[in-house]
């Protein structure tokens, strides 16, 4: 077979497509796992989750958290706000009676070059949780119900 043969070119292109698809699937799974972990850490009230949230961009259940955060007067107020947000999110989650294992069918719902939206169904309320994460910084930017 010649190096410039059509068959060899076809094989090379096919291999490149297969490698790209495998890479895309791996990224999708890691995006889903990353969003799931952030949500679970928020629900459990883990303070370390603060580092995985884009506070300046965050929208949570219809509230522009980022705007409130940006309006805080200093870093001390922002530290307190982040801590209280995580604590209240966790308390609110517990008060609903929901359990983390009730969220099922975790999957990529939508993807753009800037963001990935991960969905998880919550059959008890017949709703779907949508978590938006920035592709570049891998930080949570949105939490909403559908």
Image (cartoon, rainbow, N blue to C red):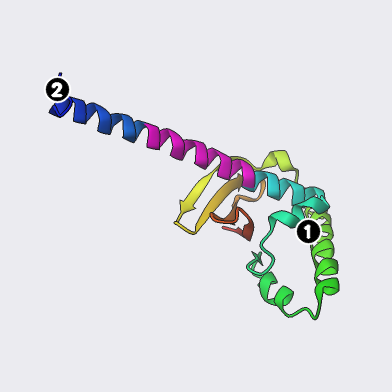
Q: Which residue is drawn at 72% across and 76% down?
A: 68
Q: Which residue corresponds to the image point at 80% horizontal and 81% vertical from the top-left?
A: 73
Does residue 79 sit above or below 32 in this rendering?
Answer: below
For label 1, the crowd category at 10 Å Cα-Cα, with few meaning under 14, some 14 to 19 and many 20 or more, is: some
Give left or right: position of 51 versus 12: right
8 relative to 105, above or below: above
For the point 39% across and 32% down, which residue is it?
19
Estimate the x, y position of residue 3 in percent, counting from the top left: 18, 25
Q: Quadrant of residue 14?
A: top left
Magenta stretch: give its range: 19-34
Q: Nearer the viewer, residue 81 or 100?
A: 81
Mark 2 nearby-residue class (10 Å; few <14, some 14–19, many ≥20): few
Query: Compared with residue 106, is residue 96 higher up or lower down, i.e. above or below?
Result: below
Query: Looking at the image, which residue is at 80% across and 58% down?
Result: 86
Is residue 73 located in the magenta-colored stretch of the structure?
no
Question: Residue 128: x and y, percent?
Answer: 58, 51
Residue at which label 1 appears: 89
Q: Position of residue 91 (x, y in %)?
A: 84, 56
Which mark is drawn over residue 2?
Answer: 2
Taking the image as shown, residue 61 lies to the left or right of residue 6, namely: right
Label 1 element class: helix
Which residue is at the front of the view, 82 or 85? 82
- Helix, strand or loop under label 2: loop
């Amino acid at each position: 077979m010649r190096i410039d043969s059509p068959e060899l070119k076809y094989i090379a292109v096919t291999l490149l497509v297969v490698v790209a698809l495998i890479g895309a699937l791996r990224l999708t799974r890691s995006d889903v796992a990353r969003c799931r972990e952030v949500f679970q850490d928020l629900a459990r009230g883990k303070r370390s989750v603060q580092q995985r949230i884009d506070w300046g961009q965050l929208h949570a259940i219809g509230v522009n958290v980022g705007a409130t955060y940006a309006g805080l007067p200093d870093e001390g107020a922002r530290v307190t706000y982040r801590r209280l947000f995580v604590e209240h999110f966790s308390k609110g989650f517990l008060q609903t009676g929901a359990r983390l294992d009730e969220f099922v069918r975790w999957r990529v719902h939508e993807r753009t070059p800037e963001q990935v939206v991960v969905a998880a169904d919550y059959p008890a309320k017949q709703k779907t949780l949508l978590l938006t994460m920035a592709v570049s910084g891998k930080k949570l930017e949105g939490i909403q119900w559908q």
